[in-house]
């Protein structure tokens, strides 16, 4: 199986039933005139963006364009120099979780206890362990709860990291290139797993990636950041599960890559003037 073949829905060995989240429980995102500078360097410039609750948004762009800085601001890990940011009801720390490229597991803790680290504070030990076990079952690792991280493959470690992010039932899941270090086949499996979990739980998802095909495989909408500005806002209305290599996906990928390499975008994709206004 290669990236150009049709995607097959990922089905973990054990997939626990999870009640679907109401759209109102996911976190909407609103950015108005958002800018961020580090000394004399302006990383984000007057970004306006609305992300409806429950949407899967992908952010692409060249290295250093401001993608990860924007993600950190959404999570409350950084503050804008100017402008306004609203995520859900404003309690970002309680409703948001993040996955990184490295799984960042505790080597001295077993898999179940690594997942339990993400459980809400104040939850009893028994309840936390039960929630962690359920999260592991959601990602197909329910039978690996008692093992050490060192015996897991790279893809399995990222599944544990995903379970740790899901155990608190977040309203917003931020994904900072979480699949970048995986081999091609494992990466496709993880993409399918992410899509499956998102479709069932309906949290808002924001993915930062350099991989345009990955963005199109997962997202409802792809935005491109160039030199700190929103340069392209592209809805992705393809049916799910997506078929990699389909003519429509190839057309959308070509449109994004053309813009990345300097060709002008169609006028309907970008609002005129600066700052550019995102299309909701």
Image (spheres, rainbow, N blue to C red):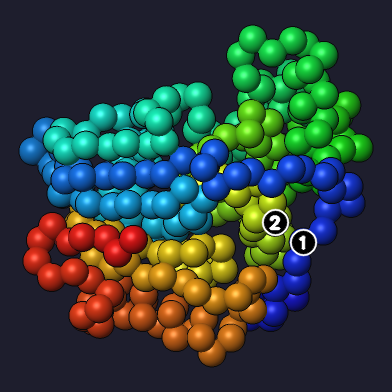
Q: Vertically, is 217 above or below 151? A: below
Q: Vertically, is 195 above or below 39? A: below
Residue displayed at 42% across by 25% down: 91
Q: Relative to residue 218, is residue 114 drawn left or right?
A: right
Q: Relative to residue 16, is residue 263 drawn left or right?
A: left
Residue displayed at 69% across by 79% down: 6
Residue 165, picture quadrant: top right
Residue 18: give x, y in percent of width and height.
76, 43
The Cα atoms of the two marked residues, 1 and 2, are separated by 7 Å
Residue displayed at 36% across by 80% down: 255
Secondary structure under the numbered disc 2 in the rendered image: helix
Bin the neighbour count of mark 1 within 10 Å (Cα to Cα): few under 14, some 14-19, many 20 and up.
some
Secondary structure under the numbered disc 1 in the rendered image: loop
Residue displayed at 17% across by 38% down: 83
Residue 142 appears in the rendering: yes
Bin the neighbour count of mark 2 within 10 Å (Cα to Cα): few under 14, some 14-19, many 20 and up.
many
The residue nearer to you, when weighing 205 against 103, is 205
Instruction: State which mark lies toward you, 1 or 2.
Output: 2
Residue 38: give x, y in percent of width and height.
17, 35
Residue 36, picture quadrant: top left
Q: Mark 2 and mark 1 in contact (Cβ < 8 Å)?
A: yes
Residue 196 numbered tag: 2
The residue nearer to you, when weighing 260 against 140, is 140
Q: Relative to residue 209, is residue 147 drawn left or right?
A: right
- The residue where tag 1 is placed is 10
């Amino acid at each position: 199986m290669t990236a150009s073949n049709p995607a097959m829905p990922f089905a973990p060995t054990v997939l626990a039933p999870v009640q679907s989240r109401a759209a109102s429980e996911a976190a909407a995102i609103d950015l108005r005139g958002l800018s961020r500078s580090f000394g004399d360097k302006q990383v984000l410039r007057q970004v306006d963006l609305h992300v409806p609750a429950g949407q899967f948004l992908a952010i692409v762009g060249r290295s250093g364009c401001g993608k990860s800085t924007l993600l950190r601001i959404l999570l409350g890990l950084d503050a804008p120099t100017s402008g306004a940011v609203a995520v859900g009801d404003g309690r970002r720390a309680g409703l948001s979780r993040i996955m990184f490229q490295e799984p960042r597991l505790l080597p001295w803790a077993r898999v179940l206890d690594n997942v339990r680290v993400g459980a809400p504070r104040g939850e009893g030990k028994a309840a936390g362990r039960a929630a962690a076990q359920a999260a592991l079952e959601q990602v197909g690792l329910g039978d690996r709860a008692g093992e050490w991280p060192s015996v897991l493959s790279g893809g399995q470690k990222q599944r544990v990291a995903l379970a740790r992010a899901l155990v608190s039932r977040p309203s917003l899941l931020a994904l900072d290139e979480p699949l970048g270090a995986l081999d091609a086949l494992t990466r496709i499996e993880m993409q399918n797993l992410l899509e499956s979990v998102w479709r069932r739980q309906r949290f808002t998802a924001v993915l930062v990636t350099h991989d345009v095909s990955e963005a199109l495989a997962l997202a409802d909408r792809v935005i491109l950041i160039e030199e700190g500005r929103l340069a392209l806002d592209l809805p992705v209305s393809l049916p799910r599960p997506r078929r990699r290599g389909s003519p429509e996906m190839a057309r959308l990928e070509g449109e994004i890559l053309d813009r990345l390499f300097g060709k002008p975008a169609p006028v309907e994709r970008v609002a005129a003037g600066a700052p550019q206004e995102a299309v909701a």
